[in-house]
Amino acid sequence: MSHLFFALKHLTCFLCGLLLMCSPPVGLANAADEVVVYSARGEPFIKPLFDAYTKETGVAIQFITDKEGALMARLQAEGERTSADLLLTSDAGNLWQAAETGLLTPVDSARLRLNVPAHLRDAKDRWFGLSLRVRTIVYHTDRVKPADLSTYEALGNPRWKGRLCLRTSKKVYNQSLVAMMIAALGVPKTEQVVRSWIANLATSVFSDDTQVMEAIAAGQCDVGIVNSYYFGRLKKKKPALPLALFWANQGDRGVHVNISGAGLVKHAKRPKAAIRLLEWLSGDFAQERLAALDFEYPIRPGIPIPPAVVAWGTFKPESFNVARAGELQAEAIKLMDRAGYK
């Protein structure tokens, strides 16, 4: 009996050893079932989507939210040690900068190329637009008629002297707007326009778009330039505010549009899983949900638009590739500085 006992004991140990050799280390299997996202978009605007993806696929999404500059600096500092697989941020200028500084790597995906229009993604497939927003004119409905408005350039006309409010030039949204104006008008003409804006300011520039709109509603000024989703957020909280959007430049190049988007981190540990998430975010369900979470637009036609956004009317957008916002960003910053735009 003792011999049989020892034989069974050794066989059991041998089988256990085989199981340990064949099993992955603790945590490794779980690592394959998750994606890590560095996001400059706040939790309320991404978590519902990530939760839906996890429910559908079983893949957990870990995410860290911060300002875009802080996240890009973190990726630079972490290098190959980073745990991030995707960088998700707003404005093509930020995505362009992340790609040009080597933080992102190209993605070969026929699905992404099909879902994301060419002018809303990087020509080298390092980043892809996921939602669309418009930066346009906002006005006081009691003191301004839509017929009084036309283009961004016309906000520099003498009729708007002391009636214009603007957000600071330090924010990338205005840098991208001016960069796209450079693409359309050239440097001399754009600088002339920006100088005329500054001459028409009713007050010092504001730190954010909400403050611009509140100043207009309070009678401090009559017109301004804001991102459409900021307008949606404020009107949801205060629907009685006498404010409306006007789509600029409909008679020529179209209104300025920009994106939120994402790219695959160069040192991603789970690139295949990250690309699958990126593809899913470009799909119909995610596009509709992403737009609805923050008063934005899907990146392609045919996807339902939130009713509150539909109410703003249709518009003709710029047709330039949004990458131009990044390519001309440095020139735009220098121009605004010369023009005295703080």
Image (cartoon, grey):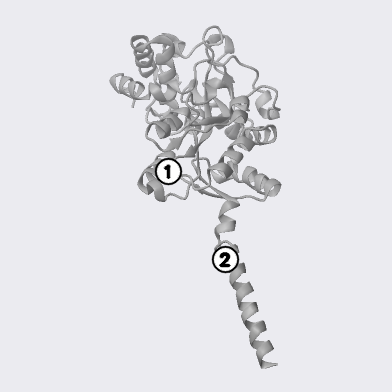
In the displayed structure, 168 sits above or below 87; it is above
Image position, residue 191 (x, y; %): 34, 14
Taking the image as drawn, is residue 327 in sight? yes
Of the 4 image quadrants, the one containing the N terminus is bottom right
Disc 2 target residue = 21
* Three-letter code for the amino acid on which mark 1 is drawn: Leu
* Three-letter code for the amino acid on which mark 2 is drawn: Met
Instruction: Tell which circle, 1 or 2, labels the residue nearer the N-terminal end.
Output: 2
> Total number of numbered labels?
2
User: Would residue 220 be found to the left or right of residue 79 on screen?
Assistant: right
Query: Residue, x 46% and y 35% (percent of image)?
Result: 105
User: Would residue 307 be found to the left or right of residue 268 on screen?
Assistant: right
The quarter of the displayed image where residue 140 is located: top right
Label 1 neighbour load within 10 Å: few <14, some 14-19, many 20+: many
Image position, residue 205 (x, y; %): 39, 28
Query: Residue, x 49% and y 16% (percent of image)?
Result: 320
Image position, residue 184 (x, y; %): 44, 11
In the displayed structure, 268 sits above or below 10; it is above
User: Would residue 154 be found to the left or right of residue 14 on screen?
Assistant: left
Image position, residue 63 (x, y; %): 53, 49
Helix, strand or loop for disc 2: helix
Q: What label sits on residue 247 in the rendered view?
A: none
Depth order, front residue of 321/273 = 273
The quarter of the displayed image where residue 274 is located: top right
Query: Residue, x 64% and y 22% (percent of image)?
Result: 312
Q: Kindly give the residue lying farthest to the bottom in the view shown.
A: 2
Disc 1 target residue = 71
